[in-house]
Amino acid sequence: MAAASGSFDVEAATRAYLDTLQGPARAQSDAYFEGGYWLILWGTLVGILADWLLLRFRLAAKFRDIGERLSNRRWVVTGVTALLYTLVATIIVLPWTIYTGFFREKQYGLLDQAFGAWGGEQLMNLGIELLIAPLLVIAIYALIRRAPRSWWLWATGVIGAFMMVGMVLGPVFIAPLFNDYTEMQPGPLRDRIEAVAAKYDIPAEHIYVFDQSKQHKRISANVSGLGPTIRISLNDNLLERTSEPEILAVMGHEMGHYKLNHVWWIVGIYLAIFAAGLFIASRVAPMLIARHGERWGVRDIADPASLPILAICFSAWMFLMTPATNSLVRIAESKADAFGLEAAQEPDGFAKVAMRLSEYRKIEPGPLEEVLFFDHPSGATRVRMAMEWKAKHVKDPQVVVPEEGYLDSE
C-alpha cells in the first residue's frame, strides 16, 4: 500500500486504545499481574521448602529404600523413587497449588470451573507427570552413573528429546484429554485463515476449535505439533468474543511463530538455560551431599535419593534466570507480532486483541518492569506497534476510538 500521510498521530491512536481501560478494570488488571511478580518468588520458595522437607525427614531416602526392597535393578529403584517423589511433593505443595490455581483465579474472575472440575484436571496432570517424570529421572540418573563429570550435558540432550516427543504427541494425545477438538466449520472466516496460511506455505489442512470456555474466558490460539501432527487450533472464546479482524490478527501471530521457527528458537533457549542449570547442580549437589548427606540419608549424587537436592539447585537457578527467559521469549513474541501484522493486515484488530489481554496482563508497565516480568510484549507496546504499522502501510489511516464497553463483550 502507499505510505500514509504524516497527519496520522501514532501516539494519539495508541492512547485512544489504552484509555479504554480505566478505573476498577485497570486497577484489577494491574493488581492481578503485579501479584504474579511475588508468585514467582513464593512459588520457588514453596518448591524448595517441599524438597527440603523431603530431605529433612529422610523421605527421599525412604522412597529409595522402598525401591531397593522391590528390586535390585538400579533403574527400578530410580523409577520408584521418582514416582514417590513426584506424588509426595505434589501433595506437600497442594495448598499453594489450590490457592494460586483456583482461589486466586476465582478472586479475579479468571476461572469459570467449579472446584471439582478444576481438581479433576489437576489429577489428570498428576497422572501424566507420574508417567513421564520417572522415565526422565531414570534416564538422567543412568547418565550420572555412566558419566559422572559430563552427565549434565548428556541430560540436556535427553530433556530435549523428551520435549520433542511432547511436541509431536501433545496435540494428539494430551491436549484432547482436557478439551474437545473439532474441525472448524467451512465458511468465509475459515477461508480467510486458510488464505493467510497458504500465502506463507503454512499447513492448514486441519484447523481445530477447542472448547476452552468451560475453563475460562481467555482468548487463545496456536499452531502446534511437528510433522504429521501439525495443526492450527483456536479456542471457542476467540470465535465468540472477538471480531473477524481480531481473529485474523491472532492467527497471523500464531502462524508467525510457525513460519519463523520459534518452536526451535524457544526450545534452544530453554535447553541452553537448562544445560547451565544442570551444570551448576552437578557441581553444587556433591558439596551439599558431602556436608549433609549422612543426615539426609543420601549416599552420593548417583543415589536417586539426591533428587530433591538436584531439584533445589535447579529451581534456584531457574528463578534467577526468570528475567533472561522472559526477555528471550518476549523477543520471539515481538517478531511474531510483526509477522502477524504483515500477514493479517488488521492493525486495529491486533490492537483490540492486545487490549483484551489486559484481563490478565498489566497494560502499561514501566520499561524495566516489562524487561523483568513480561514474557510477551505489554499491551501498550503491542498497540503502539500496530499503530506504527498502520501509519506506514494503510492509505489515509484514521485514529480509531473503540466503542465503549467493547472489552466487556462476551
Image (cartoon, grey):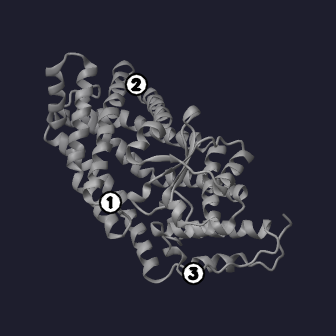
Q: Which residue is mark 3?
A: 19
Q: Is residue 181 left or right of residue 299?
A: right
Of tags 3 and 2, which is closer to the observer? 3
Sequence-first tag of 1 and 2: 1
Residue 42 is situated, as x and y percent measured from the top left of the image, at: 31, 58
Give the number of the disc on residue 113: 1
Q: Is residue 47 left or right of residue 391?
A: left
Residue 278 is situated, as x and y percent measured from the top left of the image, at: 41, 36
Dot 2, how many residues are within 10 Å of its Cα: few (below 14), some (14-19), or many (20+)?
few
Identify whether 113 is placed above or below 47: below
Give the number of the disc on residue 149: 2
Identify whether 289 is placed above or below 90: above
Dot 1, how many residues are within 10 Å of its Cα: few (below 14), some (14-19), or many (20+)?
some
Report helix, strand or loop for mark 2: loop
User: In the figure, residue 266 lies in which quadrant?
Assistant: top right
Q: Tell me which residue sits at (19%, 18%) in the image.
A: 71
User: In the figure, residue 14 lies in which quadrant?
Assistant: bottom right
Q: Amino acid at mark 1?
A: Gln
Report helix, strand or loop for mark 3: loop
Of tags 1 and 3, which is closer to the observer? 1
Residue 379 is situated, as x and y percent measured from the top left of the image, at: 56, 68
Q: Nearer the viewer, residue 351 or 219?
A: 219
Identify whether 307 is placed above or below 142: below
